[in-house]
Amino acid sequence: MKIFSLGLDQLTINDIRQAGYTVVMQTSLPDPQQTAGHMLIAASGQAGVSELRGLREKYPDTIILYFYMEHGVRGYHGIHLTCEELGVYFLPPRSTSSAIIEKIRLILKEDGDERSNVVGVLGSGPGIGCTSVAGLLAGRIAAAGRRVILLGMNVYDPGYDRKAAISLDRLRPKLTGNRLHDVDFDQLIMQDGYRYLPGNFDYLSAQDYQENEMEYLLDRASDNADIVIADLGSVPESAAWYTGMRKSALRLLVTHAKHEHRLESLMDLAGHMDLTPQDFKLILNRSGLEENVSPKSMALRFGTEIFLNIPYYPQISATLPLGKKDLAQADEKVRGLLSVFGFEPEIKKKGMFL
């Protein structure tokens, strides 16, 4: 199958070609007879939104993938809906070349070779406990004898109260130049048996991060750990959040029964990234605190499953003060998580992993 490209840059086209696809670069719309039975990728810079319906009518026998390139969460929901109605596949803003390749494989029902070891932890609102939960999981996985890196990818909150010699913003020059080395990960902060990269302390640069930088960080961290925990935070409008969501093999959503309406918006946003509620597992933090909706009812409503239920603590700290029962529950989930990633389940004796 050929892929006709209108509006993609040369680097992206090269990456698609390296993935094994034949790409025909176009400066204008090709002849419909040439594209019949093939794929046409049209970027919004060359084919406006108003031309979508005409595009579908002109190419009835062509798979059309529309790349809407205007950045920002707002504004493209209606465009995605129009694409769905017309039978046109949709690529959201911020899509990198690897995201485009994944989409092509999804459309053509091909299995990609990429195997991710990234667990994304995100939240339904600020202060819900993403960093605390991510630290809990990282610590328990490390206690099971695995190499773990926890990446602070919440660009709006460093997740670390002390002044750090190394952090996301301090690594920024190396991310921009693709110059991360193994030794950089050896220098991360050691705590509870895992290596930790605090998030961004430079608030003015929060929106400056690029998707390819975050993708590079995740790929290099994956090379240096058995499991990578990505603390994505609760604010979707960032390259780190978007890339972490896409690159994660497992997505854990920290929430509370009171955040039911927020979950609705998040699931709607996830749909534009080809993710469904089944792609998420819920972690109910502060469970039992003035709940109007039970965790089970909320999970059933959204079509998700509960991964972990954490009881309410009056003061949430960086380390969750779990009791023996809750810690045993967390360790049981960690054993299942490790099995999913191809590691042998650990045997636990007297509260310790062996």
Image (cartoon, rainbow, N blue to C red):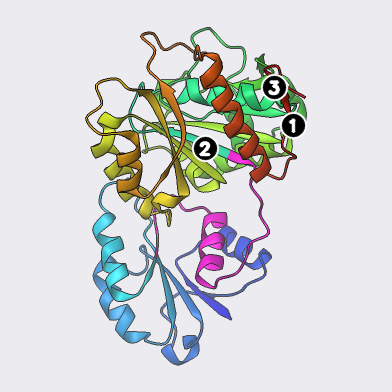
In-image side of 6 versus 109 (left or right): left
Question: Which of pointers 3 and 1 indicates the residue nearer the eye?
Answer: 3
Q: Is residue 57 above or below residue 268?
A: below
* Earlier-in-chain disc, 3 versus 1: 3
Q: Which residues fall within the magenta stretch?
A: 90-118
Indicate the amino acid at tag 2: Gly
Is residue 345 among what the camera can see? yes
Q: Are marks 2 and 1 in contact (CB under 8 Å)?
A: no
Magenta segment includes 5: no
Which amino acid, mark 3?
Ala
What amino acid is at disc 1? His
Nearest the eye: 303 or 121:
303
Question: In terms of image quadrants, where is residue 3?
Answer: bottom right
Q: Which mark is residue 181?
A: 1
Res 143 label: 3
Where's residue 335, x and y in %? 65, 34
Q: Residue at x 50, y 48 (%)?
A: 246
**Location of residue 43 with respect to 339 vertically, above or below:** below
> Would residue 292 be found to the left or right of residue 319 on screen?
left
- The picture places residue 156, in percent across and down from the top left corner, at 40, 25
Observer-side mark, 2 or 1, equals 2
**How far, Cα to Cα, is label 3 from label 2?**
19 Å
Query: How many badges with numbers are in the image?
Result: 3
Distance from disc 2 to disc 1, alpha carbons, whole Å, reads: 23 Å
What residue sits 26% from the left and 67% below the top? 82
Residue 120 circle label: 2
